[in-house]
C-alpha cells in the first residue's frame, strides 16, 4: 500500500464516543499499527491492581502527568513505536495539547474528530466498553472535564488547534467511512 521506506504517522484527537476507535480499526485494516496513549495508564492500573473505570483511569493519568510531565504518555508511546520500527502507525487517545504538540513535532499528522454530545452518549451506551457504563449526567461531567481542561491531563478542545484536518462524525457510519477513505487517500501516493 505504501511506498517502500516511507512512514505514515497519524494521530486521532476527539472526545469520548466521537469515533476514534472506529477510525483506528479502519486504519488497522489498512495495515497500520495502532498504539494508544491510554495503554500507558491501563498498564499502570493493571500493575497496581486498580479499577479500570474512567474516573480511576483519569485520576491516575493526572497523577502520572503531574509527576512526569503532561507529555509522558506521548513520549512513552512514541518510544514504543521507534523501538518497534513500525512504518505506518495510528496514535490514539491524544488528550492534551502538549501531547499533540509533541507528536506533531515528530511528524504525526493529526486528525480531529468531532461529534455532538448526544450522539456520542448514544454510541457509548451501545458499545459498552468497560468505561462506558455511566449515566448521562456522569457522561456529561466526564466529557466536559476532558474537553475543557478541567483535569490537568486533558484538554481535547485545545488539542484541536494542532490538527491538520478535522472530521465531523455526526452522520451515518457510511459517511464517516467515506471521510476516512478520503483521508487515507492523502497518504497513498
Image: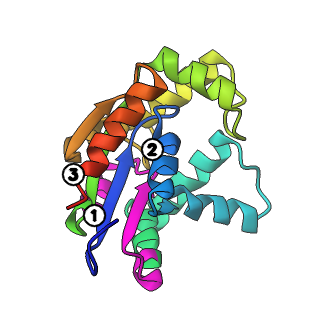
The residue sitting at 64% across, 40% down in the picture is: 55
Q: Position of residue 10 (x, y in %)?
A: 33, 57
Q: Residues within 10 Å of mark 3 (few under 14, many from 20)?
A: few
Please name which of the two marks, 2 or 1, marks the residue nearer to the observer.
2
The residue tagged 2 is 23
Please name which of the two marks, 3 or 1, marks the residue nearer to the observer.
3
The residue tagged 3 is 186
Question: Could you give the CA–CA distance between mark 2 and mark 1, rounded to whole angstroms?
Answer: 21 Å
Looking at the image, is 81 positioned above or below residue 90?
below
Is residue 159 visible in the rendered image? The answer is no
Quadrant housing residue 88: bottom left
Q: Position of residue 85 (x, y in %)?
A: 41, 82
Q: Is residue 95 magenta?
A: yes
Q: Secondary structure at mark 3?
A: loop
Is residue 182 visible in the rendered image? The answer is yes
Marks counted in the figure total 3
Looking at the image, is 48 positioned above or below residue 56?
below
The residue tagged 1 is 102
**Which residue is at the front of the view, 36 or 151?**
36
Labels 2 and 1: the sequence-earlier one: 2
Whether residue 44 sits left or right of residue 10 in the image: it is right
Quadrant housing residue 53: top right
Q: Secondary structure at mark 1?
A: helix
Q: Secondary structure at mark 2?
A: helix
Amino acid at each position: 500500500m505504501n511506498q517502500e521506506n516511507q512512514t505514515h504517522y497519524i494521530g486521532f484527537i476527539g472526545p469520548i464516543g466521537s469515533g476514534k476507535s472506529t477510525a483506528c480499526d479502519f486504519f488497522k485494516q489498512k495495515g497500520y499499527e495502532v498504539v494508544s496513549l491510554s495503554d500507558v495508564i491501563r498498564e499502570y492500573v493493571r500493575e497496581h491492581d486498580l479499577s479500570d473505570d474512567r474516573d480511576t483511569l483519569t485520576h491516575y493519568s493526572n497523577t502520572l502527568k503531574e509527576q512526569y510531565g503532561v507529555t509522558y504518555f506521548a513520549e512513552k508511546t512514541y518510544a514504543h513505536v521507534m523501538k518497534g520500527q513500525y512504518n505506518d502507525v495510528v496514535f490514539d487517545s491524544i488528550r492534551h495539547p502538549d501531547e499533540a504538540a509533541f507528536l506533531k513535532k515528530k511528524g504525526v499528522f493529526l486528525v480531529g474528530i468531532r461529534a455532538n454530545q448526544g450522539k456520542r452518549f448514544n454510541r457509548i451506551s451501545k458499545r459498552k466498553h468497560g468505561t462506558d457504563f455511566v449515566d448521562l449526567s456522569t457522561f456529561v461531567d466526564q466529557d466536559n472535564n476532558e474537553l475543557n481542561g478541567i483535569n490537568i491531563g486533558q484538554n481535547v478542545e485545545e488539542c484541536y488547534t494542532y490538527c491538520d484536518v478535522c472530521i465531523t462524525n455526526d452522520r451515518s457510519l457510511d459517511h464517516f467511512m467515506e471521510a476516512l477513505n478520503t483521508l487515507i487517500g492523502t497518504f497513498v501516493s
